[in-house]
Amino acid sequence: MYTITGTAPPGEAVVYPDSDGKPMADNTKQYRWITTLQGNLDLLFADDPAVFVAGDLLWYPVEGDNRTRIAPDVLVAFGRPKGDRGSYRQWEEGGIAPQVAFEILSPGNRMQEMAQKFDFYDRFGVDEYYIYNPDTFDFSAWVRRDGRLRAADFTDGYVSPRLGVRFELSEEELAVYYPDGRRFLSFVELGEARQAAERRADDAEQRAHRLAARQRELGIDPDKEN
């Protein structure tokens, strides 16, 4: 999404649209990465009511200005309650800017656009900014130090100070890991893992039933405590 800057015309009622009319993603690969990051980060902080995670949500940092806005592919705001929003209006969010922003590139992204986004995130207080290109496997990370976003060193992997997740980049892909070492999975992979777990549970239950039946054949009461 393009960064748009400016101010609303004086004397007009300020309306803050919930959409900029642009698509969330340009292709399936970009969309899959956006939903994977948003979904796994939402899951990571599911038990914390004061962490808000969203994808493709317009962020308005300045009250009265409906043209200074941006829609990060994924944003994380610590200190803000969960819940549905049409947009993230910072003055209605205790003045708290999203601390973490992700952008997943598509072939349609241009250098000028990405430079504008960087300037926006730097200017309006994002603490961590990540860019990933799933076509070229290029990954970049910036962390705020001394009041500015500065490039982070991730030669041997990088752990987000805010999120606690680890990024590992190989020649073939970017892998993201939970603090406990589990890898971020796509919706399909999460579904497959759940189905596999359910099958293992069913198999274990069937083995227990067969064992109990065999014990009864031998005159042993499987329900009787030793």
Image: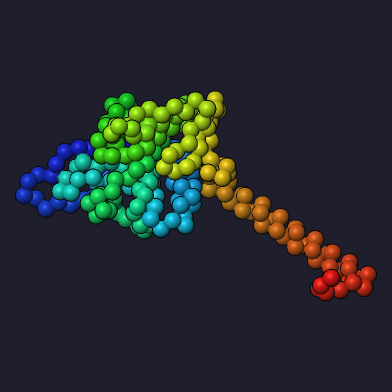
* Residue 64 point in image, percent of width and height: 15, 48
Asked if one can make out residue 147 in the rendered structure from this viewpoint, the answer is yes
Relative to 157, does residue 124 appear above or below in the rendering? Answer: below
Q: Nearer the viewer, residue 70 or 101?
A: 101
* Residue 119 point in image, percent of width and height: 27, 32
Relative to 11, does residue 120 appear above or below in the rendering? Answer: above
Left or right: where 22 falls relative to 189? left
Left or right: where 118 falls relative to 173? left
User: At x 49% / y 52%, what residue is drawn?
Assistant: 43
Q: Quadrant of the N terminus?
A: top left
Q: Quadrant of the C terminus?
A: bottom right
Q: Quadrant of residue 111?
A: top left
User: At x 62% / y 49%, what residue is drawn?
Assistant: 193
* Residue 6 point in image, percent of width and height: 16, 38
| Type of colouring | rainbow
User: At x 53% / y 40%, what residue is drawn?
Assistant: 177
Left or right: where 32 falls relative to 143? right
The residue most toward the left is 11
User: At x 16% / y 45%, what residue is drawn?
Assistant: 65
Q: Nearer the viewer, residue 71 or 161?
A: 161
Asked if one can make out residue 35 in the rendered structure from this viewpoint, the answer is no
* Residue 56 point in image, percent of width and height: 35, 45
Left or right: where 23 falls relative to 27? left
The residue most toward the front is 146
Q: How many marks?
A: 0
